[in-house]
Image (cartoon, rainbow, N blue to C red):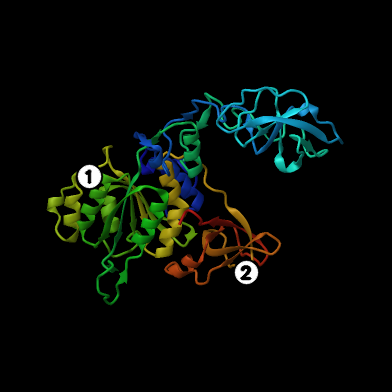
Amino acid sequence: MKTIAQIAAELQGYDPQALNADQVSAFLERLVQPMTTTEEVGIFEGLGRVLARDVVSPLSVPPHDNSAMDGYALAGAQLVAGQPLTLRVVGTALAGKAWTGTVGAGECLKIMTGAIMPADLDTVVPQEFTTTAADGHITIAADVLRLGDNRRFKGEDLMEGGVALSKGELLTPAALGLVASLGLKTVTVYRRLRVAYFSTGDEILSLGEPPREGAVYDSNRYTVFGLLTRLGVEMIDLGVVRDEPALLEAAFRDAAARADAIITSGGVSVGEADHTRTMMKQLGDVAFWRIAMRPGRPMAVGRITASGFQAKEVSGAYAESASSYQKDTKPETGGAILFGLPGNPVAVMVTFLAFVRPALLRMMGSTRPAPPLLRAVSTEAIRKKPGRTEYQRGSVTTAPDGTLQVCTTGNQGSGVLSSMVQANGLIVLHHGQGNVAPGDAVDVMVFDGVI
């Protein structure tokens, strides 16, 4: 396991006080390690989990050549260009039951979608392309059909013995359907990642507390909860932790004993008058960054140890929750990866989406590449200084000509959550990019399914 200093030495131009977004991503890719503990779960519990083993197909899908639609099966060699074809119907093939008769020259078979194609028949004409005569014959119009049309081949989807899903695949609804089509009841997946999270600061109010001067209600825990829920991890909510060394130490050590990753908000800016930074340094190998980005400039990343935590020594509001969860430790020993995020609400969401979410997916064992950024035309001028990456909240719509267009959603202050609610994506203005003029194309990170 490499130390923070060793990882930093591998990165060209690493400066913790002036990191760009690409350097942050490269650092985190080296810091976090994929999960190794596995378990077997039923298919209904597999959604959102990551495969720990290839799924090898025990059979071919489909298991036989079959009809792709309702119609009539025939030998396609009888079709002649420019001429209609009349055939006698000799029976009906139903899905789930093999046809046992024979079909000769000048004959066809009525067939249902999914029914096995009889030997020597290789083409299906949809019933709407035919006319039916009272004497049991059908006529196929000229040039509406080609040999081999509307026939599904055995193993067209999957061949027996082939890899149906690869290790590292995230099990989506479509993947679950694929597993079920193979007749498999269970899948081998990585253990669900555990993530502990809490907010810090004496100025943070929990819901239900009366307002007081200079204090604000905690919103970060609820946005982090939503982001983690969408990710499908096991969550450990440690609430709001006041700026008291004993409470902070208890929270960090408890989280490190129970979780694979810890997410905090607040207390990572240079010069903040609290104990959070001091406790992070004391309990782990932690780097404090100033990232060339907006919003979300301050961030702390590293590892926190769980050793030495004794809940009974802690006094105050945190002691009860720390004691009650002490027995709920993760299977692996050691500490946890720390993501210390800024305190401003939008900055928390942006840094999570840009850096934390990809890192957590890697920890979950996922090898799926990140979704590509979309290109959209800006409908307005956007001011931007080269030398930092900016994430502007945007509203993406479809222009009359079918192209994507985007505009910002009002006030872009890092504490303005309302503009994030109105947005359906982030306009990503890259490190070297300058001002954007109306009509310029920009990159957009869409939110759908993520937040």
- The answer to whether the residues at label 2 and label 1 have Cβ atoms under 8 Å apart is no
Amino acid residing under circle 2: Ala
Q: Position of residue 282 (x, y in %)?
A: 25, 50
Q: Mark 2 or mark 1, which is nearer to you?
A: 1
Identify the disc placed on residue 302. Answer: none
Q: Which residue is mark 2?
A: 381
Neighbor class of circle 1 (other Cα within 10 Å; few <14, some 14-19, many 20+) is few
Q: Position of residue 102 (x, y in %)?
A: 68, 22
Of pointers 2 and 1, the one earlier in the residue sequence: 1
Q: Is residue 219 above or below residue 197?
A: below
Horizontal side, residue 174 vs residue 150: left or right: left
Spatial CA distance of label 2 from label 1 is 52 Å
Q: Which image quadrant is residue 79 in?
A: top right
Say whether residue 144 is visible.
Answer: yes
Identify the disc placed on residue 328. Answer: 1
Amino acid residing under circle 1: Asp
Horizontal side, residue 15 vs residue 99: left or right: left
Q: Is residue 325 above or below residue 164?
A: below
Horizontal side, residue 56 vs residue 379: left or right: left
Q: Position of residue 169 (x, y in %)?
A: 47, 38
Say whether residue 430 is visible.
Answer: no
Relative depth, front residue between 88 and 82: 88
Residue furthest right in the image: 82
